[in-house]
Amino acid sequence: MIQKTPAEIVLIKKACEITRDALILAKSLIREGISTFDIDKSIEKFIIDSGGTAPCIGYMGYPCASCISVNDVVVHGIPSKNIILKKGDIVSVDIVASYKGYCGDATRTYCVGEVDDEKKKLVRVTKECFFKGIENARVGDRIGKISHAIQMHAESNGFSVVRELAGHGIGRKMHEPPEVLNYGKETDGAVIKENMVIAIEPMINAGRKEVALLSDDWGVVTRDGKPAAHYENTVLFTAKGPEVLTLEKDDEYYPR
Ligand code: MF3
Ligand code: CO
């Protein structure tokens, strides 16, 4: 269902805490020389040790707990022993954790050592897109309010919005209605309802918006080879406004 019950929200919040803490763990592991395979294995172990499960494993044949996407890989990078992080890379870590049947979904793009100014700005603006997206969105608005604000912020900074992928409702399944586009008009999309839970996930390219699929049939790359960034949180809408369930407590946007 699009609107969750209080009991469901308790479980979603727990799944979101595991997801957030798995990201914090991933961040602590990011350094030159580590493989994306080793990062994924640590994430998987953390989720299991926390009493959760990793629903990405086996999802349409996907082999891993997380998606780890480096530089021009926008999303769905399959972790690999052959993908070794190096200084100057940006790396998007996308994690779904499930707890007692309910999911949380979040992504961060991390920098490996010093990265160039374009990448630095891309990572910052992609995160800002998420917060611009929820800033003015309230119960009764359309999802398009979020979508439009994301697109405006990305494009006004000279970046582009990937069209082929979107955010989504989340609950028992990691992908539920409604669809949460990262572009469009304020009047588009489903009406935001109280106790709706959605994953909002701007996927922003430094260059052109076009993407291609890697030969592994999962990895999505920019066609122009320029870098891409991804920032995602699971968000609950209450009568008071949006509540970001996967946000780190020391984040500059964490409500105080
Ligand atoms: N976590 C992704 C999302 O943000 C989906 C992961 S695809 C999977 O929607 F194959 F890894 F499961
Ligand atoms: Co998602």
Image (tube, rainbow, N blue to C red):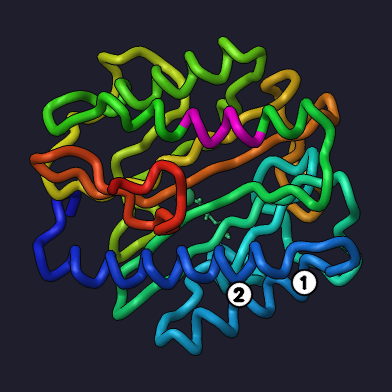
Quarter of the view holding residue 154: top right
Residue that mark 2 sits on: 43
Q: Nearer the viewer, residue 149 or 75?
A: 149
- Numbered range of the magenta stretch: 123-129
- The N terminus: image quadrant: bottom left
For badge 1, the amino acid type reads Phe
Classified by dominant secondary structure, the portion drawn in magenta counts as: helix
Secondary element at tag 2: helix
Q: Give the mark count.
A: 2
Tell which residue pokes out farthest to the front in this image.
256
Mark 1 in CB contact with mark 2 (< 8 angstroms): no
Secondary element at tag 1: helix
Q: Is mark 1 within 8 Å of ligand 1?
A: no
Where does the image place residue 254, in percent across and percent down from the top left? 36, 48
Position above or below: 34 against 236: below
Q: Is residue 127 magenta?
A: yes
Residue that mark 1 sits on: 37
